[in-house]
Structure formats: C-alpha cells, structure tokens
Image (cartoon, rainbow, N blue to C red):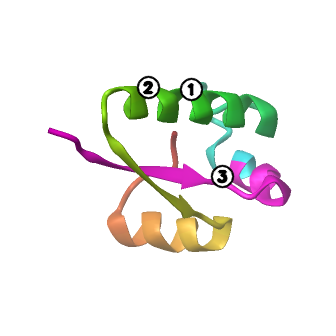
C-alpha cells in the first residue's frame, strides 16, 4: 500500500535564510546543491517504494511561524 509523503521544496534564493535558521543541525547541508541532491535521492527512494510525493514550497518566515507555534526547534 502506498503512502503519501510530504516533501519540502526550498526556493534556491531562500536557501541561505533557511541555513541561518537550521545551520546548527549538522545534517542540514551547507549548500543548496547539497540539499537538492539529498532531497532528490530521498524522493526517488520513496517513489521506488510506490509512495506518492506531495511537494510543498516552504519559505523561511512561514517556517519560523509554524515551528514556533508547534513548539519545535529548527532542524532537518
């Protein structure tokens, strides 16, 4: 049975702002190209299992509001 996976899509021009928010997480790639490569590999792995990928574009300001409201620390 397939699952629906939510995949975060970060606009390239906003990556540096995300890195400032999440950069203390050692798993968060230092460059957009590193993040994109990792994200594409993860999505391919899910698709190979038959999962459905729903991509959502996330912006730094919206992310900050959401994580504070959820009581979460920023991280990958």
The outermost residue toward the right is 13
Q: Where is residue 9 drawn, in percent x and y?
A: 61, 54
Q: Are marks 1 and 2 in contact (CB under 8 Å)?
A: yes
Give me the disc on residue 50: none
Callout 3: helix, strand or loop? helix
| Residues at marks 1 and 3, CA–CA distance in whole angstroms | 23 Å
Image quadrant for the N terminus? top left
Q: CA distance from mark 1 to mark 2?
A: 6 Å
For residue 43, above or below residue 17: above
Residue at position x 39%, y 55% in the image: 72
Residue 12 place in picture, x, y as percent: 81, 53
Horizontally, residue 28 falls left or right of residue 13, namely left
**In front of the other: 69 or 16:** 16
**Residue indicated by mark 3:** 21
* Residue for point 77% across, 51% down: 15
On residue 41, the disc is 1
Asked whether residue 43 is drawn in magenta, I would say no
Residue 25 in sight: no
In the rendered image, residue 28, in percent from the top left (x then y), is placed at 62, 33
Q: Is residue 14 above or below residue 73?
A: below
> In this picture, which residue range is highlighted in magenta?
1-18
Q: Is residue 42 above or below residue 61?
A: above
């Amino acid at each position: 049975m397939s699952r629906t996976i939510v995949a975060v899509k970060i606009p390239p021009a906003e990556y540096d702002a995300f890195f400032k928010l999440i950069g203390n997480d050692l798993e968060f790639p230092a460059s957009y190209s590193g993040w994109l490569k990792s994200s594409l590999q993860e999505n391919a792995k899910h698709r190979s299992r038959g999962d459905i990928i729903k991509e959502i574009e996330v912006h730094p300001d919206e992310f900050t509001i959401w994580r504070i409201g959820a009581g979460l620390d920023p991280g990958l």
